Image (tube, rainbow, N blue to C red):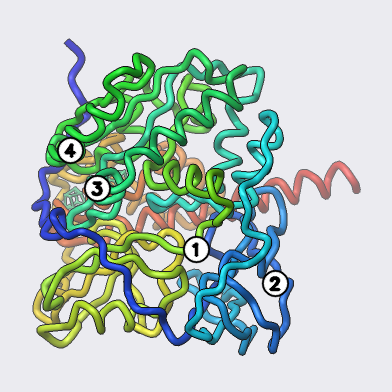
Amino acid sequence: MRKDISSLHVPHNKHTAACVPQRIEIPAEVILPMNMHSGHDAEPIVNVGDHVKVGQLIAREEGRFSSPVHATVSGTVTEIATMPTANGKGTTFIRIESDGKMEVAETVKKPEITDCASFLQAVRDGGIVGLGGAAFPTWAKFNEATNPDYKVDTVLINAAECEPYITSDHRMMLAHPELIADGIEYLRTYMNEYLGNATFKICIETNKADAIEVLEKTFADKDYVVVHKLKTIYPQGAKQVMLYNATGRVAVSGRRFPSFGALIVNVSSLALMANYLNTGMPLVERIVTVDGPAVAQPMNLIAPIGTRISELLKVTGLKAEPGKVVVGGPMNGTAIYSVDDPMVKVSNAVLVFDEKTAVLPEASACINCGRCMEKCPVRISVAEVDRAMKIKNADAKAQALIDTGVRQCVDCACCSYVCPASRPLLQINWEAKAFLKKYAAEQKEKKEANING
Ligand code: SF4
Ligand code: SF4
């Protein structure tokens, strides 16, 4: 019998699993960065002084994998400027001062869909992106299934939410199973040629018994929908891990996901896509879990995208001085510098650690124990990646890094978690992948220069 890829049993800390999401009061202002998706930054189409309404398009997509941005409160555009980002590049943001009315834009109306092309365009216009963390535009993911080289027979609806603390997808499944059902029907209807015979597997960890019950009831009469229960382990939600554990297929590096006969979509993305297609209201708000050792009252909140994190913390309160604030999960979320930063489309959680729990142990030399490789879901030895990163010659370094398989890393941080020498292994992987990306771009440039010259 095939064995699941299993990795770590991490403490779940799902303290907010029973917390019904509470809508926060309308924030005084929102800050909307133009890089809330994985492609090129969006381009503002409003000016300072403009009055905007909820759902109004304020920045259009720029390029194939970009995504539009919509106003999330009604009010006045008070600033368009640049803010720093973690990658050092910076991005433009639009600040909207709320008028407290939450007036809905006249443009918000159910999109007209007649076929696959108009369906994909609507998903694009709704600003829907992967809400599990990747922020890849959802329409582009679906569009890949139309490639005649692929034959998609399984749609994996990623409801694992395997990171500790986070319960926003869990609460979405309990609150809106009907939207998940609508999302599946939209795909079956408008992508019938490509997904009409596909099985839709809602992949959910067994620690969400109430959501499993709701979903099993919702889909009891739909033989093309399976509620696929998965062991509660980390990183069950990583797409390569989910593909193997739900279908037995192995994701090979360098190939697009649909080439394995599967599409994967986050459960909240699917539900919010259906909400847009049903009502015309784009992605303007989301559920965000606020938790962590320094949070007085862990909660799930519903907040407009762009709300400052400090506004969320005012609702939950703090019981200790924050030592570190992380957006996303504790394993592969991003630490932020200031609680004045806004929550963005992919902000499924805000975790606040106190000064004691935020201190990381000092890194020491690798003792070659092999645990990083043993616990890695894709069997990478980060100790080897670390050694390859020290090679001086760029060509030899690139080849050595490719040989380690680091391009398949799913950023789960299991290696960092188990390393007895407390080495910053996830960061080493990020640096290695950034080096390979830059190296590939340089090689391409050289090749083009040779052809043209
Ligand atoms: S190498 Fe990548 S995939 Fe493997 S455990 Fe580390 S972060 Fe996860
Ligand atoms: S887990 Fe840490 S100490 Fe052990 S081999 Fe990997 S990098 Fe070295």
Q: Amino acid at mark 4?
A: Ser
Please name the residue that numbered disc 3 is placed on. Answer: 170
Q: Nearer the viewer, mark 2 or mark 1?
A: 1
Q: CA distance from mark 4 to mark 3?
A: 22 Å
Residue occupied by mark 2? 44
The local crowd at label 1, few if under 14, some if 14 to 19, many if 20 or more residues have their Cα within 10 Å, is many
> Is there a contact, CB below 8 Å, between mark 4 and mark 3?
no
Dot 4 alpha-carbon crowd within 10 angstroms: few under 14, some 14 to 19, many 20 or more: some
Q: Nearer the viewer, residue 256 or 110?
A: 110
Q: Tell me the element at label 4.
A: loop
* Residue 401, horizontal then vertical, whole percent: 44, 44
| Lateral position of residue 381 relative to residue 207, left or right | right
The disc at residue 7 is 4
Q: Quadrant of residue 155?
A: top left
Q: Which mark is residue 284?
A: 1
User: Alpha-carbon distance for marks 4 and 1?
Assistant: 35 Å
Does mark 3's beta carbon lie closer than 8 Å to ligand 1?
A: no
Q: Residue at x 38, y 29 (%)?
A: 156
Of residues 364 and 343, the one drawn nearer to the viewer in this rendering? 343
The mark that comes first in sequence, 4 or 3, is 4
Verify CB contact (< 8 Å) between mark 4 and mark 2.
Answer: no
- Sequence-earlier tag: 4 or 2: 4
**Which three-letter amino acid code belongs to the residue tagged 3?**
His
* Label 4 lies in ligand 1 vicinity (Cβ under 8 Å): yes
Q: Earlier in the sequence, mark 3 or mark 1?
A: 3
Q: Amino acid at mark 2?
A: Pro
Q: Indicate the position of residue 214 as horizontal and vertical percent values.
A: 21, 35
